[in-house]
């Protein structure tokens, strides 16, 4: 797991950790059931306060991404990842549907939509 | 308290200078007095001096290196530190007595001189004097600024030595005083110990008031 | 683990600390900041009973710090700024004096630290540099299984590389969640990284004792054109630095300036140094 903290970012540090861990999980960089470093070990590695790491982990646990087993540690939660993925896929599908509908009503054809999509994708 | 006493013992024995001092102090004083102990008072002075020097040395290091704050931060209390000093003083006297007797013993073996190794008269008198001396000097260390206290410490010592340089008859009169002679000196020892207890309480009070 | 309530002490010369209260739970690091002469050292000395308090209560490990003085000190690792040792002694000799005082002394840990710090135990203490003496103090303080480490300005006078090393050591210690660290410093950059809680004392009084995250979220620096500096804004700022070109101020309630146009001002995170600087000006 790779986490990079930026001191100059607008986001508070715990948010940065939250986002990066969440992304790692959704992308599959972190497997289900995989162990995460303890809040203290993470604090030490990142040179931040343990309260901050705890806060990030707590939020991730609340949102179903992590689960803590007393005495064993913190792990990537198993079930809910699929649920979140499904939810996200549904959202993407809905948005794409919207794109298709609007494009059709404007008279754009399939090739033009793909062009636009390619440009936008490359921009990021 | 044991740790505190061990600390003081280490303080007076560590390092080359201390070791030389320990070995040489008693014989040098003995030689300076011309080994003339028929008067007994020189011997008394030596036993007293040596013990007193050990006590002063243990104080002087704390003064020199300002270690008081550090010692107080160790698992101990000011009260225990003070009491440890008094216990150390008594041990120093015991050591001085035995140690000086050892040297006398050596002199007995290697010379034609013949000394009485455990003379009660000398022991009890010097012990009483030592108790009085310590009762007076230790609280000074907790009241006065360190340099002045050191000065007083040495001053008292010099005063004592001068006393012992008085004529024999004068000294004998001093030791015939009831303080030293009542009940074979037991009375004096009890008074001395009583003074030590009072002195301890005073020192604890003074040390407590210090910052 | 450490609980201070309404602590007060007045010196004969006039300086006093008044009504200091804060607490530190186990497993956390608390940084104790304040300008020179604000009462940091006094507070620490009072906790260790090196000074007598006038009023208030101090509890360490839930025990009264005077009634259980010996027991408490046995579990505290103490590092003092000007650690006074018997300078003529070697580190080995000094350690043999210290060791018997502690019930849970661990020689192995001590030797490990001496190796890690590259200290030769047979060197006389007077031959050590300030940094080495500090490392030695740390080695002594960390070798008796202490549950609370108290340090007074442990990093002052040390070069930045060295300070980082010490911070790394503190991070390692705090991996054990039964240990707490309390240290005073005026090098605030160290704390911005490592501290979990910050207690700020100024002129003998407590300014705040909060988690570091709370502090960083609460205080901000506002910069802008002097025209923007209305009376209302002035009242909301804790401290201002004004020049003809611009003003800069500290604010602790970001909501109070919501009405100001976003383009006219810059809002930044306030560093601990900023907080200390601007609040000191007010006093």
Image (cartoon, rainbow, N blue to C red):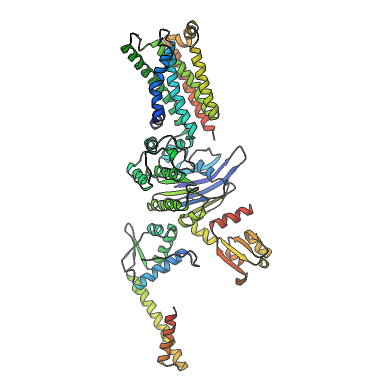
Counting from the top left corner in percent of width and height, residue C256 is at: 61, 65
Tell me: residue A58, above or below residue B120: below
Residue C283: x, y in percent?
A: 63, 52
- Work out which residue is located at the far bottom of the displayed protein and give it: A107
Q: In percent of the image, x 45 and y 55: which residue is there?
A: C194
x, y percentage for residue B78? 47, 33
Q: Could you tell me which residue is drawn at 33 percent across and 41 percent down?
A: C107
Residue extending furthest toward the top:
B169
Q: Which of A34 and A110 is in front in this view?
A: A110
Residue C68 visible in the picture:
no
Asked if residue A119 lies left or right of residue C7, the reply is left
Quadrant of the rendered image containing residue C275: bottom right
Relative side of A2 to C157, left or right: left
**Residue B203 in sight here:** yes
Question: In this picture, is B166 found above or below B211?
Answer: above
Please tell me in which quadrant of the rendered image residue A119 appears: bottom left
- For this rendering, which residue is in front, A37 or A82? A37
In the picture provided, is C244 more to the left or to the right than C137?
Answer: right
Residue closest to the eye, C135 or A55:
C135
> Where residue C183 sits: x, y (%)?
48, 48
């Amino acid at each position: 797991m790779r986490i990079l903290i930026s001191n100059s970012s607008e986001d508070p540090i715990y948010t940065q950790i939250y986002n990066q861990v969440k992304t790692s999980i959704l992308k599959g960089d972190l497997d289900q059931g995989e162990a995460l470093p303890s809040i203290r070990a993470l604090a030490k590695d990142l040179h931040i306060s343990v309260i901050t790491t705890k806060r990030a982990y707590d939020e991730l646990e609340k949102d179903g991404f992590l689960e803590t087993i007393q005495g064993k540690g913190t792990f990537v939660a198993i079930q809910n990842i699929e649920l979140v993925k499904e939810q996200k896929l549904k959202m993407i599908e809905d948005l794409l549907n919207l794109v298709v509908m609007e494009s059709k009503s404007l008279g754009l054809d399939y090739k033009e939509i793909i062009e636009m999509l390619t440009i936008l994708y490359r921009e990021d | 308290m044991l740790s505190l006493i061990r600390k003081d013992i280490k303080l007076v024995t560590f390092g080359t200078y201390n070791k030389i001092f320990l070995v040489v102090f008693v014989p040098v004083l003995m030689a300076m007095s011309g080994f003339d102990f028929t008067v007994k008072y020189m011997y008394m002075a030596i036993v007293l001096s040596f013990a007193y020097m050990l006590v002063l040395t243990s104080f002087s290091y704390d003064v020199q290196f300002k270690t008081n704050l550090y010692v107080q931060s160790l698992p101990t209390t000011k009260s225990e530190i003070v009491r440890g000093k008094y216990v150390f003083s008594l041990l120093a006297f015991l050591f001085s007595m035995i140690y000086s007797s050892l040297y006398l013993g050596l002199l007995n073996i290697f010379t034609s001189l013949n000394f009485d190794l455990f003379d009660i008269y000398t022991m009890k008198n010097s012990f009483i004097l030592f108790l009085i001396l310590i009762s007076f000097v230790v609280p000074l260390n907790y009241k006065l600024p360190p340099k002045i206290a050191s000065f007083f410490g040495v001053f008292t010592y010099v005063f004592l030595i001068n006393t012992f340089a008085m004529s024999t008859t004068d000294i004998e009169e001093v030791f015939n005083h009831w303080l030293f002679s009542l009940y074979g000196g037991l009375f004096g020892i009890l008074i001395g110990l009583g003074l030590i207890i009072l002195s301890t309480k005073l020192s604890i009070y003074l040390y407590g008031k210090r910052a | 683990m450490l609980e201070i309530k309404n602590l007060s002490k007045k010196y004969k010369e006039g300086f006093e600390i008044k009504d200091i209260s804060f607490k530190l739970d186990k497993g956390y690091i608390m940084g104790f900041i304040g300008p020179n002469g604000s009462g940091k050292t006094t507070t620490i000395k009072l906790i260790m009973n090196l000074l007598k308090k006038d009023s208030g209560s101090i509890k360490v490990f839930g025990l009264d710090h005077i009634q259980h003085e010996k027991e408490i000190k046995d579990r505290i690792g103490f590092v003092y700024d000007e650690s006074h040792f018997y300078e003529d002694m070697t580190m080995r000799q000094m350690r043999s004096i210290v060791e018997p005082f502690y019930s849970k002394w661990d020689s192995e840990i001590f030797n490990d630290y001496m190796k890690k710090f590259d200290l030769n135990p047979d060197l006389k203490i007077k031959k050590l540099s300030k940094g080495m003496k500090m490392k030695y103090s740390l080695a002594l303080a960390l070798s008796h299984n202490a549950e609370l480490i108290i340090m007074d300005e442990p990093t002052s006078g040390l070069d930045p590389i060295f300070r980082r090393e010490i911070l790394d050591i503190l991070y390692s210690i705090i991996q054990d969640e039964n240990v707490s660290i309390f240290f005073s410093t005026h090098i605030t950059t160290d704390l911005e990284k490592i501290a979990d809680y910050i207690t700020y004392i100024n002129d003998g009084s407590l300014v705040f004792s909060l988690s570091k995250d709370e502090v960083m979220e609460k205080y901000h620096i506002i910069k802008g054109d002097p025209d923007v500096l209305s009376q209302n804004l002035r009242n909301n700022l804790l401290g201002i630095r004004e020049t003809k070109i611009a003003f800069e101020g500290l604010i602790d309630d970001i909501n109070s300036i919501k009405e100001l146009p976003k383009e006219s001002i810059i809002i930044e995170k306030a560093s601990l140094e900023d907080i200390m600087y601007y609040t000191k000006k007010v006093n």
